[in-house]
Amino acid sequence: MAALQFGTAAGVAAAVAAEEEAGAGLALPGGGSGGLPPAAESFPKDFGYGAEEEEEQGRGARGGGGEGREEEEEDEEEEEAGVGGGVAGEIELGVGGVVLGAPCGGGLALGSGSGGVGGGGDSSKQPRILLMGLRRSGKSSIQKVVFHKMSPNETLFLESTNKIYKDDVSNSSFVNFQIWDFPGQMDFFDPTFDYEMIFRGTGALIYVIDAQDDYMEALTRLHITVSKAYKINPEMNFEVFIHKVDGLSDDHKIETQRDIHQRANDDLGDAGLERLHLSFYLTSIYDHSIFEAFSKVVQKLIPQLPTLENLLNIFISNSGIEKAFLFDVVSKIYIATDSSPVDMQSYELCCDMIDVVIDVSCIYGLKEDGSGSAYDKESMAIIKLNNTTVLYLKEVTKFLALVCILREESFERKGLIDYNFHCFRKAIHEVFEVGISSHRSCNHQANIPGLKAVTHNGTPRNAV
């Protein structure tokens, strides 16, 4: 079987011909499709348009045309509808007409019903992210804005949380975990509080501190909380959101972060917990900082992150792209990006582009009766800014989108970029297909002698 490589300008035509003749396989970084990270509980089970869609296609015809075409034809012959003006000089959108999820209303649901995400519906096995902090620190507002598309202004009318609220985001998002929102008045010394059950199996603990309030009590509660959690589950990630910084000046933000960082780490040092690492983020629901902070929290829980970053690095280096993000479309969390530094303005541009694509698709991409999906296999967009920058969005799976930032002169080689994207997309699908099949067969493999184990970055090693 021939190997499909990322193309360069000189060799793309020959590679396309070779692929058509041979029914090519995909060569992933690390030397072959077998060298991939093992599966984890957070793998989505229906990450793309697999068996579930084939079953639906068997039930009857769908709108939108183009489902019968092969992937190669989709990438080469996408319809582009010109949409005028706005922030950019030119916007081109390709809108399909298929299927998955509910029509756009208060929020966009991309994977309705049984969901396309792993865990098999067993919420007890899903990783948890805990949201903790004092009353009125903004915990519930963060959850509603990031995962439920609530307007930041509407959060002013949210009532205080008086019990633990569990929110399963798996059914409408690529990421597969539960968010537990804790009331601020919860007493950890209360004997009825079974903190061992809660902290055991938790992936990350996010402690929210109101930067506009006196945070001395919050720091005391932070120390008590992370100390107990660390003793029960030292593998947990500990994140601190210094929240509501939109009302502070830039100098005040930096000083507040420095002071909280110093005091929190001093308290841990005095308690002999120097190995407990806290990560600090300045956040606000009124800008994109909360989405970027949550992106970094979620990335730490994705075991296949090194493979995704490697794929993105290879993709942009062979395509003349400056920056690329792999977005979860529903939450606008980026689950991976290339190794170059993340610029906040670039991230905000990409988030706004996703909003534009979804909003325009909700108007023009649905059927007359309102059925169909605003985001599907035909979804793509090109936005050309007036500073010679081009934003390019392509659908990867029904939950994921690739958003690229590049120069106009690089975009003149769009055929090369589309070919390399086709390779990247197949690689992403294969990463999760191998992960899922590995996870399902792990019990059988454990009993077979002489098998090769796989390290975190996909390198085979001898089983111990």
Image (cartoon, rainbow, N blue to C red):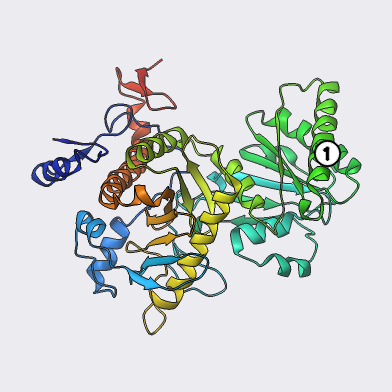
Secondary structure under tag 1 reads: helix
Q: Is residue 384 left or right of residue 244?
A: left
Residue shown at 44% from the left, 65% from the top: 113
State the residue lying farthest toward the bottom. Answer: 369
Location of residue 112 in the rendering, given as x and y in whole percent from the top left corner: 45, 65
In this rendering, does residue 98 appear at all? no
Between 202 and 380, the one lying in front of the other is: 380
Quadrant housing residue 456? top left
Quadrant housing residue 139? bottom right
Name the residue that disc number 1 marks: 255
Quarter in which the N terminus is drawn: top left
Q: Is residue 309 left or right of residue 232?
A: left
In this rendering, does residue 5 appear at all? yes
Q: Amino acid at mark 1?
A: Glu
Residue shown at 33% from the left, 27% from the top: 30
Count of number-bearing discs: 1
Residue shown at 25% from the left, 38% from the top: 8
Q: Is residue 51 left or right of residue 453?
A: left
Location of residue 136 in the rendering, given as x and y in whole percent from the top left corner: 82, 57
Between 266 and 344, the one lying in front of the other is: 344
